[in-house]
Image (cartoon, helix red, strand yellow):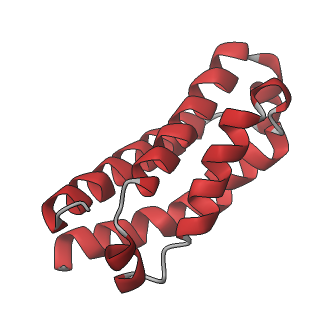
Amino acid sequence: MMSKRDDRTSMRHMLDYAREAYAMTRGRTRSDLDADRMFQLALTHLVEILGEAAARVSIPTRDKYPQIPWADIVGMRNRLIHGYDAVDLNLLWDTVETDLPPLIATLEDILENG
């Protein structure tokens, strides 16, 4: 089982990758995602790593922070990894644009205030 410190490190990684993915879409449009294979791959990879970091957070810590949609984050990672040949770019874009901002805010609050 991971220690609390390791969980905080994983949560810090989640925050870093969520911020990076969200920043990558600033000034870009959904159609840019269709047109740019490197953008697709980079954004997919960042969301996968975010999910991998979430999967490493212990169950007791996940239970402590139910406001984070742990199962959805890990599920998205699994969907991207195992469905690598058919990534739903609409879902990826919506995840980054809609789901990451509140996740970033929640992780910032948890990591700054305990």
User: With 39 as the anchor, is 101 left or right in this view?
Assistant: left
Residue 57 drawn at (x, y percent)? 35, 61
User: With 69 as the anchor, is 2 left or right in this view?
Assistant: left
Q: Quadrant of residue 56?
A: bottom left
Task: Give whichever of 7, 11 is nearer the camera.
Answer: 7
- Tell me what residue is drawn at x 61 percent, y 46 percent: 77
- Tell me what residue is drawn at x 39 percent, y 81 percent: 65
Q: Quick one: which residue is furthest to the front in this view?
A: 1
Q: Is residue 26 among the parts visible in the rendering? A: no
Task: Give whichever of 71, 105 is nearer the camera.
Answer: 71
Q: Against 92, is 72 above or below?
A: below
- Tell me what residue is drawn at x 56 percent, y 72 percent: 69
Q: Against 16, is 105 above or below?
A: below
Q: Is residue 35 among the parts visible in the rendering? A: yes
Residue 75 drawn at (x, y percent)? 65, 56
Q: Quadrant of residue 63?
A: bottom left
Task: Give whichever of 111, 32 is nearer the camera.
Answer: 111
User: With 86 as the anchor, is 62 left or right in this view?
Assistant: left
- Tell me what residue is drawn at x 23 percent, y 60 percent: 2
Residue 9 drawn at (x, y percent)? 22, 53
Residue 95 drawn at (x, y percent)? 68, 54
Quadrant, the C terminus:
bottom left
Q: Against 7, is 17 above or below?
A: above
